[in-house]
Amino acid sequence: MEMIICKKLMELNKEKRIPFHMPGHKRKLSAQDIIQMDITEIRGYDNLHHPEGMILESMEQLKEFYGTQKSWYLINGSTVGILASVSAVCQPGDEIIMARNCHKSVYNAARLLHLNPVYLYPEYSEEYDMFLDIREKQKEEIKILLEKHSKIKAVVIISPTYEGVVSDVAGIKEILAPYGIPLIVDEAHGAHFAFSGDFPESAVSCGADLVIQSIHKTLPCVTQTALLHLCSELVPADRIEEMLSIYETSSPSYLLLASAEYGICYTQEHPDRMQEYVDNLKKFRRKCAKLKHISLFTPEENQVYDYDIGKLVFLTKSSNLSGAELFRFLLDRFHIECEMETAFYCIAMTSINDTAESFERLEEAIFAIDEELECVPRMDTEDPETTKGVLFSQKPVQCRPVWEVKNGEKKRIPLEESMDEIAADYIYLYPPGIPVLVPGEKITKEIVANIKYYLYNGYNVPALSEGTIEVSCSGDPLEES
């Protein structure tokens, strides 16, 4: 057998790419030191699922630092934290309020538990095709939903979003408190909030009951490392631990545990590095105000509740480029690899391990591209047969439960012929993994047009295969809900 993956990864260092993407360590870890930590549950080295020694002691320190009831290391990423959290507070048949921009892992939890999702749609920017925050009108909607649906057992939101937009977690929890309903916050992209007052306040200290953080995204930790925080007494800790033992591997990686602990300790013990990182961010953002065509997303212009300045969202709508073209220019011409791109923007993710030199290289590249934009032909971002790519210009209608459709007979048909059918698979853009369609939802003309728009503009839509989509074979009449 030939080593293909290893060779390809070893070649990456020769390419000298500058990583403005996750993981937050930015490839500045010593591989030799890490390999020496790869053990199993040998005598004297504790067990993640039954911690009594060093792992328990380390998690006690986590609890003290974050000010939680209990905190757990996760070595299956935030996904396992979300699955465990939802499973700990819900029973099959329960209802759950889900922000529609939740990660696909929340949808999978609802599917596994046969939950009935009630969707909450955060504020949406049609200009940038981007979800924003949960505002006063959505809070009022939560109140209405709580009165209307008696079986709601949890509310799940994402804050911050992939683009760095933060919602009023404390305000949402205030609404839920009289009902005794837990608030679960997917704070995957906000693990760094606790380390500097220049970032938004973490959901951990804003009243959320369960908070999940992907520390590998913005802290110097290896991929798959995450944290789950229990922040109130509303959810029993032993229930969380039971669910973690179900969803998380029974052979947890000590290498990942050590990396998680190291990344948190390093960030905590180096406030000077954190301040240098924040200063570099602020300096970079000030300079970008002078760009002519490209611009940075700002909380002031978009009137969001709060915003993570560590997310550099380069808006290209007023330029001659699409976000996808900007992404490719940065990579091909300047060896700078960003996190993701859409038709309207390109995201550069930053962390404490980004140096002043890295920011200078990004600045030089962005300004060089910005100067040339008038000479670059604009990409045609709309096929004559598609509509504007507004993710939820029409809210999908759930006609059948997810689990019913996924367990039933399915078939693949051309996307063009799928109107009025029932989706049998998740259709989502990746990243960030927000479903355009959920199994059991009706496929409309507008949804088909939007999917075609995303395909035409080069988005990654994993569930589509050669222009076909999976639909339900059930002959039952539609029962819209």
Image (spheres, rainbow, N blue to C red):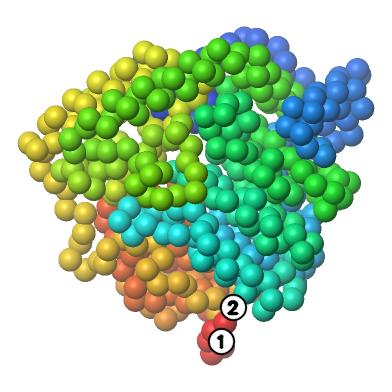
Residue 125 location (% of width, % of height):
37, 57
Name the side, left or right, on which 255 lies relative to 377.
right
Identify residue for label 1: 479
Separation of marks 2 and 1 at Cα, in angstroms:
7 Å
Q: How many marks?
A: 2
Q: Quadrant of the C terminus?
A: bottom right
Image quadrant in which you'd find residue 299: top left
- Residue at 38%, 44% in the rendered image: 300
Asked if labels 1 and 2 touch by Cβ distance under 8 angstroms, the answer is yes
- Is the residue marked by circle 2 packed among few (<14), some (14-19), or many (20+) residues within 10 Å? some
Between discs 2 and 1, the one toward the N terminus: 2
- Residue at 82%, 31% in the rendered image: 48
Q: Secondary structure at mark 1?
A: loop
Q: Is residue 422 visible?
A: no
**Camera-nearest residue between 171 and 464:** 171
Residue 328 location (% of width, % of height):
27, 35
Name the side, left or right, on which 193 lies relative to 415.
right
- Looking at numbered disc 1 in the image, what kind of residue is underneath it? Glu
Residue 248, relative to residue 11: is it above or below?
Answer: below
- Residue lying furthest left: 375
Identify residue for label 2: 400
Name the side, left or right, on which 333 lies relative to 25.
left
